[in-house]
Amino acid sequence: MKKKILVANRGEIALRLIRAIQELGHTAVAVYETPDNEALHIRTADEAVWLGDGPRSDYLNIDKVIQAAKKTGACAIHPGYGFLAENPDFAKACEDNGIIFIGPPSNVIQALGDKVTARKIMQEAGIPLVPGTPSLAPGEAGLAEAVEFCNTHGYPVMLKATAGGGGRGIRRIDDEKQLKAEIPVARAEAKAAFANDAVFLEKLVENPKHIEVQVIADKEGTTVHLGSRDCSIQRRNQKLIEIAPSLIPDQALVDKICETAVQAAKAAKYFNAGTVEFLVDKNYNFYFMEINTRVQVEHTVTEMVTGIDIVRTQIKLALGKKLAFAQDDVQIRGYAIEVRINAEDPQNNFMPEGGKTVSVYRSPGGYGVRLDGFAYQGYTIPEVYDSLLVKLTVHGFSWNETVDRLRRCLNNFVIVGPKTTIPFYLRVIDDPDFKGGDFNTSFLDTHDYLLEYEDFTSEGNKLAHLIAEIHYRQQNPYAV
Ligand code: ADP
Ligand code: ADP
Ligand code: MG
């Protein structure tokens, strides 16, 4: 039966969700704030509801989103990632209003959203963890706990916000002086960012790989994994390039990590799609880090190598269907790489380029190429949201073929207006360590020379600039 599903998000992920809803034959309802007046997700959806002027505050307004669903008669809400996606109060509000939340139940989001509670669940289930503390007590008592932990386990440690996410609220601590100085600062930051000042410590894993596993579970508790991803290429603890499957050569180890992820999901009574994140050290020991209770930005690489539409599956499971495939049906074919093309200037500390107009936009195509974006020629990037412009995901038979395809696509891209991360990615993928699969979360710090490149002005780009100028000025600047 045709159903109405509300998409509580914006940008590329809103489009991704709308496409899946429409492919299933359902009706997609978009919501938007005033700065998104010109956004593509409004035009692509079947209906759109204006929430307010925002910015961000209305996408984050639980009551307004619930009211939009009620007003339009939507029976379900997909939250995407970010905004309300991991807010247990939002999932609870859906439950209380008889609206299906496309994700796990609110109590699961609540438990896993607290990194310390999640660690406790995993510890009881026998999942490997790095040593860590509970949330530190307030004031002097907490400082004493922290000092004792570090005296026992040694420096360096990671100081983390218990309610943290998106790479924020994480800092490396190398000695006691720094520990004492940073705890109050971290608390204040966590309070401002997550409305919760709890912090805790974890032993720091030196130069780890970030390996994560896509899991998916139906309401009967049948849980399968869709293989691994390597998300080690990060800046400021935030992912830039993601790869599926991981390049760890020891297949038995990768299988073990994937099986542990399923065990972790089961221990958390997980339902719907989620991601179990691990750190892998240089001796190939692996440790649970956290579970993200939503669709990830990088779900596309897993879709490319498994052929499974994760969002379609999420919706069907939330509407009450059982998993249509078993673990043995999931086959990993080839490799996929996603690059997050951000409107940022990598050479200026990745400063966002919001507010600029995309005067030319030409994207690559061809075999094994997937684009999840929302920019178009003439689109002005709102300054008030994140800087992700388009995700380029390529699929290939072998690792080398996939990197070659990515290079070709990055070279084919023409974006005139904002600076982007494209020229930087072109440098990264030709780095011998990247090509050799020899990288960890320190890659950017140890390869900062990759940021030293000539401003990217291929002949194609020069021509595109000229065409854009003619188009906008309605005259040829070179005509006499
Ligand atoms: P978030 O919720 O912000 O994603 P995570 O706990 O997943 O936070 O950590 C984000 C990133 O921070 C990881 O991918 C990794 O690069 C780094 N990190 C987190 N914990 C540790 C640790 N104990 N040792 C080393 N690096 C860590
Ligand atoms: P559909 O909506 O096409 O009926 P299902 O509910 O059967 O799909 O499954 C959801 C997703 O899982 C789809 O992307 C589909 O391609 C994938 N899928 C279904 N069956 C299998 C299978 N036996 N092996 C691998 N993937 C499958
Ligand atoms: Mg994380």
Image (cartoon, helix red, strand yellow):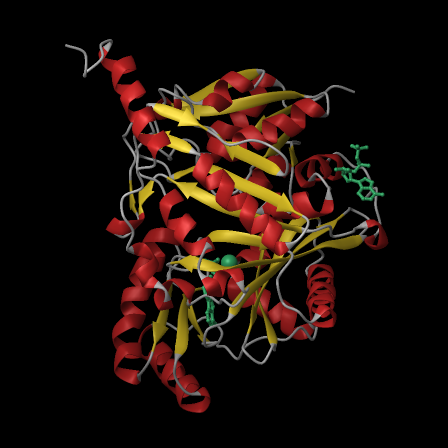
Q: Position of residue 43 (x, y in %)?
A: 50, 16
- The answer, for residue 23, to whether it is visible in the render is yes
Camera-nearest residue between 247 and 323? 247
Query: On the rendered structure, is 460 left or right of 433?
Result: left
* Quadrant in the picture for the C terminus: top left
- The residue shown at (74%, 52%) is 332
- Residues 244 and 366: in front is 366
Can residue 8 be seen in the rendering of this structure?
A: no
Q: Is residue 463 left or right of residue 396?
A: left
Rendered position, 158 above or below 232: below
Pinpoint residue 443: horizontal percent, then vertical percent.
42, 65
- The x, y position of residue 215, in whole percent, is 69, 53
Q: Is residue 458 above or below residue 330?
A: above
- Ligand 2 rendered quadrant: top right
Viewer-closest of 419 and 34: 419
Quadrant where the N terminus is found in the figure: top right
Quadrant in the picture for residue 154: bottom left
Q: Residue furthest bottom?
A: 152
Residue found 53% across the figure and 31% down from its top: 14
Say which of 96 and 286 sits in front.
Answer: 286
Residue in the image at 56% along x and 37% along y: 79
